[in-house]
Structure formats: structure tokens, C-alpha cells
Image: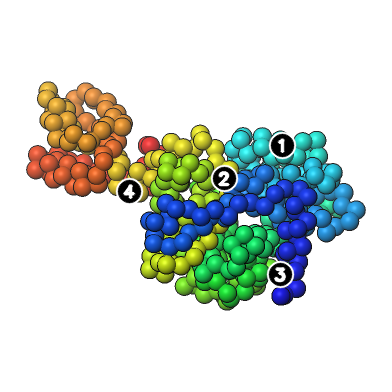
Amino acid sequence: MSDFQDKARAAAKAMRAVFPETPLLRNAHLSDLYGADIWLKREDLSPVRSYKLRGAFNAMRKRDGLELVVCASAGNHAQGVAFMCRHFGVRGVIFMPVTTPQQKIQKTAMFGGDSVEIRLVGDYFDQCLTAAQDHAKAEGGFFLSPFDDVDVIEGQASVGAEIEAQLGGVPDTLVVPVGGGGLGSGLLGYFGSKPNYTFVEPKGGACLRAALEAGKPVTLDKVNTFADGAAVARIGDVTFERLKDVGLASTLQINEDRLCTTMLDMLNVEGIVLEPAGALSVDALKDMGQMIRGRRVVCITSGGNFDFERLPEVKERAQTYAGLKKYFILRLPQRPGALRGFLDMLGPDDDIARFEYLKKSARNFGSVLIGLETRDPKNFTVLYEKLDAAGFVYTDITEDEVLSNFII
């Protein structure tokens, strides 16, 4: 037994005075679907609906006389720190970007109560982070990193201690979401080389892969913040030192739109609410195929802080990825019956979700923005063949990120 394992187990034991262990549940639906023995470690069922309070607890419990904790976060880390500030009776100042959804701000305030002060600074996380670090330095407070701290890593490793005890051993495969690397490096430190690992990142925030390719942490030029719980521009220095030898073959990068299909499946089939980052490990199973068949697999569902106001966006992304929804601009002749001619081409499973047309004087053609939903992607092939045969001019803008974001 390693010293790190001892510390992780001690952390897990100490946490029981604050919150119960999260359940490890076998999922029959996923097991049947992939021909494997699949278990979900439900970190989405922690008091703050993510694993982040573990690292916050461990880092704070180890510092006697702690008076001020400062952190920067747009979500889960903020809630974990707020929860623990209230538990330990420590004053906390939590910096969040001005653009943070109100729901996350309210939940952070709810968990922290009178123990925390929330300051909204900057439009982007980097601005918020700089302000938090400057404040901690000026006030002599403890800056609590969301991942790049040895005590935080040790606290996140308590997930591994619980898995081992609940499963009665080590899984064959461990599927781990990665943002800044705190959870991944903690689990790798706890289990060592015993299980096969798959470290999963959102495609638009794959900082671990970038660091592995460069041989050192690098800052991504651009980050897609949809999976905000794991969308990190630069992996931590401490965490990368522990993850640097995992190899590119042990990583997966998940398309954010495909991630939405898994979020909807888990909600509709299992009644499990997962945020985008929380669904990463489950979505990764789609790419693992024969690698996991017949094996005992544990997926970390790392968070369930999902604002249901985002559900329409999730559905839109899922339909687009599955090829069940498309947007296109149709050049429609300005003559009687032209619109009817187009409508007659639609099949029984085609549904108009959006239609915008402005008739302009002294023009022979007008542009129509059309959004169509269907039950089978092949229906669009049939429709486009009909449009081509009839001489209609159209442009599919579904994959045009700039144009579709502006119009849709």
C-alpha cells in the first residue's frame, strides 16, 4: 500500500463526517448496450452535484488557522469551496466571471451562506483567475486551486478509495473525465497501473492531449466552453507531471454535439441528469467498442449541475449531430405557387421548425431561412434530390458555425 493510497483513504474517511460516499451503481442499460459490466460512480449525487468538494475539503482541513480562502471558478469548484467554507467556518471570497449563469451564482451563494462573498469580475475565466490570485496575495489569503494543488489531488483521489471499497477490487477499465487534471492524476496516483485508463476531454478543450503532444503544458488558443466543467485552456503543472506518461492512446476527445446525444439518452432512458462534463465518460463508451467487451468498467459521472434552460440548446445540438435537423437558405422564385411547390416536396416525417421569408419588391427571387427536423437522416438526401431536380437553389448552413450562430 502506497503512502498516497493511505492519504486518499484517510481523506475519504474524514469526509464521512461531512457527506456520505457517492454511490457506485451498475447500469444494466449501458452494460447490455456495450456487452460489458458497466458501473457509474455517481459524483453527480454529491451534496454539490460534483466531485469538486472533495479537493476543497482536503485542502482546507489540512490548514490550521485558516481565515481566508480565495478561489476563481465559473461553476463546480466555486460550489465546492463555498460548501466547505460554510462547514469549516472560514471566510471565502469567490471570483466568478460576469458571464456566469445566474443559476450557478445563486447555488454558490446558497452553499456558502454568510461565509462567502461572490465577486463578478471579467468576461472570461482568465481575467477572473488573475483577479482572484491578486486578491489572495494582497489579503494574505489561501488561493485554492481547482486542480493544481497536491492536497486537492489527494482529495479527488478519495473517489478511487471509494470505488475500490464499493467494487471489492479494482476495475478492469476506468473512464475518467479530464479538465485541469486533478481527478485524473488523483485516480492514477491511487490505482497506479492496475486498471486500463481512458482519459476523456471535450474536443474544444483538450488541454491534456495538447500537453502530451508538446511534452509540457501549453495554453490552447481557443476553448469551447460548452462543457464548462472540463473546458480548461491549460492543464495544471502539478497534474501534468503526474499524467505525462499516460500516452495519447489512453485519451479520447469528444465532440460537444455528440455529447448532447448522451446527455439526452441518460435523461430520457435512465432519468439521470448530467451536465456536459459529467456525461463525458459515458459518451466515451461509444468509441471504446471491443476494448471493453466483457470487462468491468467504471465511468466517473463527474457532475450534474445542469441548468434546464439549456435543454433546448442540448436538444438542438443532439439533433444536428445525429443529422436529424438541418438549416438551409432556399432561393425561392417570387411567383404564385412557388412555396407550395417546395412544401409538396416534404415527406411525412419532415417537420418545419423554422421558416423566415421576406418578400422584396422588384426582385425575382427571395431568400427563405428554413429549419427542418426529420426522423431519419436519409430523408434529407431524398429532399435535396427533389430540390435539385426541380431546379431550386439552396445552401445548407448547418455546419457553417459563423453563419448559423448569427442567424440561428
Q: Which mark is residue 5?
A: 3
Label 1, label 2: how far apart the Cα atoms are: 18 Å
Label 1, label 3: how far apart the Cα atoms are: 34 Å
Q: Nearer the viewer, mark 1 or mark 2?
A: 2
Q: Which mark is residue 304?
A: 2
Q: Which mark is residue 57?
A: none
Does dot 1 land on a helix, a strand or a loop? helix
Question: Is 407 placed above or below 163 here?
Answer: above
Q: Which mark is residue 109?
A: 1
Q: Residue at the location (50% across, 63% down)?
A: 297
Label 3, label 4: how far apart the Cα atoms are: 43 Å
Q: Nearer the viewer, mark 1 or mark 3?
A: 3
Which quadrant does the C terminus fall into? top left
Label 2, label 3: how far apart the Cα atoms are: 27 Å
The earlier-in-sequence mark between 1 and 4 is 1
Q: Are marks 1 and 4 in contact (CB under 8 Å)?
A: no
Q: Residue at the location (68% across, 60% down)?
A: 158
Q: Can residue 72 be seen in this snapshot?
A: no
The earlier-in-sequence mark between 3 and 4 is 3
Q: Residue at the location (39% across, 56% down)?
A: 32
| Mark 1: amino acid | Ala
Q: Judge the density around disc 1: few (<14), some (14-19), many (≥20) Cα neighbours within 10 Å.
A: many
| Mark 3: amino acid | Gln
